[in-house]
Image (cartoon, rainbow, N blue to C red):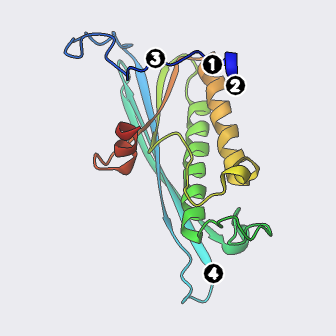
């Protein structure tokens, strides 16, 4: 890499300001909308007659300001194993770890959450400030997915396309997109602090 990267001094990371400093939050718009999605899944039960699984996506819309409003929703999708975007095989690579059915289902649910959130944002008034939230990180991650093949994975492609669509919407309207961690003991938090 040579000259392409600047030399890193021997010292470690340090605070660039006073860590005890307190700042006033910026003013928020008088009218705004919060959209959120969260999902759950029921895996295939090998002891049942039909090899089916369920992905359920819950939605929340809360509007604040002069015209407060709220709407809650939930849509369950009953799918067969033949509908799945993933399978237990690894496309012929004996050294690649295949995602488990449960991991594949979790990835499918996360993609469905983001896709539903995108549709909620698209249906929202374009001039109203909107905060769009997903439960968990915005990073679609599974330790059992082969990293080299991840971008070829149909679920990952859909997820990235929905993130791109949301980014495009954020450039055209007042929109903030965020993932949140609802479990403070989550390994995501520990990993973030560890790195």
Is residue 94 shown above or below 123? below
**Which callout, 3 or 4, points at the residue further toward the start of the chain?**
3
Do the numbered discs 1 and 2 sit on residues whose CB atoms are within 8 Å? yes
Please indicate whether residue 188 sits to the left or right of residue 56 in the image.
left
Q: Nearer the viewer, residue 172 or 143?
A: 143
Q: Nearer the viewer, residue 101 or 8?
A: 8
Q: Secondary structure at mark 4?
A: loop
Q: Which residue is mark 4?
A: 51
Q: Which mark is residue 5?
A: 1
Q: Which residue is mark 2?
A: 1
> Depth-wise, is mark 2 or mark 4 nearer the camera?
2
Q: Which quadrant is the N terminus positioned in? A: top right
Residue in the image at 21% along x and 12% along y:
22
Picture quadrant of residue 46:
bottom right
> Depth-wise, is mark 1 or mark 3 nearer the camera?
3
Q: Which residue is mark 3?
A: 9
Q: Secondary structure at mark 3?
A: loop
Q: Position of residue 64 (x, y in %)?
A: 36, 24
Q: Looking at this rendering, what residue extends furthest in the right direction?
A: 92
**Which callout, 3 or 2, points at the residue further toward the start of the chain?**
2
Crowding around mark 3 (Cα neighbors within 10 Å: few <14, some 14 to 19, many 20+) is few
Is residue 46 shown above or below 22? below
**Which callout, 1 or 4, points at the residue further toward the start of the chain?**
1
Q: Position of residue 127 (x, y in %)?
A: 55, 16
């Amino acid at each position: 890499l040579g000259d392409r990267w600047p030399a890193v001094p021997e010292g470690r990371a340090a605070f660039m300001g006073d860590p005890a400093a307190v700042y006033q939050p910026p003013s928020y718009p008088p009218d705004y909308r919060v959209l959120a999605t969260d999902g759950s899944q029921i895996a295939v039960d090998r002891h049942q007659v039909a090899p089916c699984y369920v992905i359920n996506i819950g939605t929340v819309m809360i509007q604040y300001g002069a015209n407060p409003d709220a709407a809650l929703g939930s849509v369950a999708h009953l799918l067969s194993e033949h509908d799945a975007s993933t399978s237990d095989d690894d496309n012929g690579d004996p050294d690649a770890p295949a995602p488990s059915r449960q991991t594949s289902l979790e990835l499918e649910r996360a993609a469905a959450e983001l896709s539903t959130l995108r549709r909620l944002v698209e249906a929202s008034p374009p001039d109203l400030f909107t905060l769009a939230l997903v439960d968990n990180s915005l990073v679609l991650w599974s330790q059992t997915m082969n990293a080299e093949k991840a971008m070829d994975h149909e679920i990952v492609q859909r997820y990235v396309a929905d993130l791109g669509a949301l980014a495009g919407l954020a450039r055209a309207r007042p929109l903030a997109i965020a993932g949140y961690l609802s479990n403070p003991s989550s390994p995501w938090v520990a990993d973030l602090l560890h790195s």
